[in-house]
């Protein structure tokens, strides 16, 4: 029997029922749904809208349902249309008539708005915790690798030397911004829609400040029509998740490159790699590739939500039920990706020697030779040209700038002295970059 069966005379079409139901995916909000109902029932009792005996009975009944679900004694299922109908039907089954008073002064429209907001808020808090753990990992890697030299790249071509600490520090910054974005979203989200009813409030003397407080919200929402039709907070959160996933994806791409046979900067631990069914020698960076790949689906989720909301007239429309699967998919994907990335990063082996060697090759200290000449009074643009010639010579000789003899240097520029060799050593190149935010600052 549906909650709304009263005005219907014919049975529901089977496909209509299947198409309409949301229990299969909104059942994960059972905790939030019950919490919201406990607050609503308590308030109804307090305001004398229902008797305090009924209110107590309802609260006890709801608590027993929650307990039984958590203990695995009650399975969420059957023919209920959604989680709201399921809980209400189960309550009435358990406590009788009083259960039928729970929905006084409430609509599923404000109920679902509340549940989804609380679910989002809980998930957002978990995401903050997981990102903080990831940042801890970056900080540990930074501390241990202030003088681990590696090449820095532009256009994926070796550019200038840097350190692993500096490189990981860049990711730390990205995830710090993500944390700050999550904080903003949480703050804007934290207004309680409960009490908006279907969209126009209700004739009962609800205490919306009370329920907002009970449920940990800063205040009740201002406009009851907006309360039931707003999904901005979800869009905002899924945008935050998309940005997190984009950061994870960029890091994954680097890990995949660093883990390749050609680079061998890192070795991903067995726990985060898989093998090939045909090539026995292979150990593939599948988790990093999947994090990169799943970024597409998270962006897709964001896009679905944007499109669902576009053009909806006020107030509630059933289209909004379509917010859930995309939002939950983004939430699950990003949370798992953050946890896996953290595990992968903290168990990865850094091949410091290999990074060091690689930083020495590829003329990463060419800018430093130019800077050396500038210190000897040569204008930078002229110095740039001289170093270009030196690089050409090295390419012909198949050697590094450090390997040229002093007379070879002097043939091209007589301003160069013996001190060139210490000035362009890897250590010196990094140490001398002490601009605020540069790798030398971390040494
Ligand atoms: N399952 C619905 C949803 O997720 C709950 C709200 C139903 N409200 C309604 N008026 N049909 O949106």
Image (cartoon, rainbow, N blue to C red):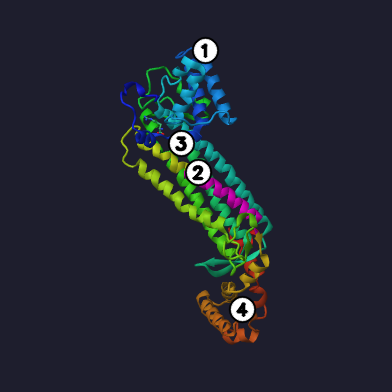
Q: Residues within 10 Å of mark 1 (few under 14, many from 20)?
A: few
Pointer 4 with pointer 2, Cβ within 8 A: no
Using the numbered discs, state the Cα–Cα distance from disc 4 to disc 2 in whole angstroms: 49 Å
Mark number for residue 400?
4
The residue wearing badge 2 is: 331
Determine the secondary structure under disc 1: helix
First along the sequence among labels 4 and 2: 2
- Residue for point 59% across, 82% down: 398
- Classify 202 as above or below 244: above
Q: Looking at the image, can residue 192 be seen?
A: no
Give ligand 1's quarter of the image.
top left
Determine the secondary structure under disc 4: loop
**Residue 106 occupies which quadrant of the picture?**
top left
First along the sequence among labels 1 and 3: 3
Magenta residues, start to end: 329-348
x, y percent for residue 159: 55, 69
The residue wearing badge 3 is: 24
Of circles 4 and 3, the one toward us is: 3
- Residue for point 32% across, 38% down: 312
Q: Quadrant of the C terminus?
A: bottom right
Q: Residues within 10 Å of mark 3 (few under 14, many from 20)?
A: some
- Residue for point 47% across, 44% down: 329
Of circles 2 and 3, the one toward us is: 3
First along the sequence among labels 2 and 3: 3
Q: Residues within 10 Å of mark 4 (few under 14, many from 20)?
A: some
Determine the secondary structure under disc 2: helix
Nearest to the observer: residue 225 or residue 381: 225
For the stretch drawn in magenta, the main secondary structure is helix
Q: Quadrant of the N terminus?
A: top left
Nearest to the observer: residue 191 or residue 15: 15
């Amino acid at each position: 029997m549906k909650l709304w069966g009263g005005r219907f005379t014919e049975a529901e079409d089977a496909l209509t029922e299947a198409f309409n139901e949301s229990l299969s995916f909104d059942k994960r909000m059972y905790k939030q749904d019950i919490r919201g109902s406990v607050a609503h029932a308590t308030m109804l009792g307090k305001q004398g809208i229902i008797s305090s005996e009924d209110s107590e009975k309802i609260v006890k009944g709801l608590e027993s349902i929650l307990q039984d679900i958590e203990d695995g004694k009650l399975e969420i299922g059957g023919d209920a249309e959604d989680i709201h109908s399921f809980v209400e039907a189960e309550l009435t089954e358990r406590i009788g008539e009083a259960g039928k008073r729970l929905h006084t002064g409430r609509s599923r429209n404000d109920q679902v708005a509340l549940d989804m907001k609380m679910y989002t808020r809980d998930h957002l808090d978990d995401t903050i915790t997981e990102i903080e753990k990831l940042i801890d990992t970056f900080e540990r890697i930074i501390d241990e690798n202030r003088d681990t030299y590696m090449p820095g790249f532009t256009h994926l071509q070796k550019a200038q030397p840097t350190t692993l600490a500096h490189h990981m520090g860049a990711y730390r910054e990205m995830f710090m911004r993500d944390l700050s974005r999550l904080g903003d979203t949480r703050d804007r989200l934290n207004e309680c829609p409960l009490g908006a009813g279907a969209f126009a409030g209700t004739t009962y003397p609800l205490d919306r400040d009370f329920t907002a407080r009970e449920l940990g919200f800063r205040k009740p929402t201002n406009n009851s029509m907006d309360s039931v039709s707003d999904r901005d907070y979800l869009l905002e959160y899924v945008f935050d998740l998309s940005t997190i996933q984009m950061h994870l994806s960029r890091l994954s791409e680097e890990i995949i490159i660093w883990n390749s046979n050609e680079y061998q900067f890192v070795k991903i631990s067995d726990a985060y790699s898989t093998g090939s069914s045909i090539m026995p020698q292979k150990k593939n960076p599948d988790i990093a590739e999947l994090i990169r790949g799943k970024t597409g689906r998270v962006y897709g989720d964001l896009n679905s939500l944007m499109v669902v909301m576009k053009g909806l007239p006020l107030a509630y429309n059933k289209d909004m039920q379509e917010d859930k699967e995309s939002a939950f998919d983004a939430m699950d994907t990003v949370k798992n990706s953050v946890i896996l990335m953290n595990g992968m990063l903290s168990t990865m082996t850094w091949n410091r020697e290999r990074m060091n060697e690689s930083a020495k090759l590829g003329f990463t200290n060419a800018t430093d030779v130019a800077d050396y000449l500038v210190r000897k009074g040569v204008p930078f643009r002229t110095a740039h040209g001289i170093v270009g010639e030196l690089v050409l010579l090295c390419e012909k000789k198949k050697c590094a700038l450090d390997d040229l003899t002093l007379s070879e240097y002097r043939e091209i520029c007589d301003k160069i002295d013996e001190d060139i060799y210490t000035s362009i050593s890897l250590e010196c190149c990094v140490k001398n970059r002490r601009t605020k935010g540069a790798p030398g600052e971390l040494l």
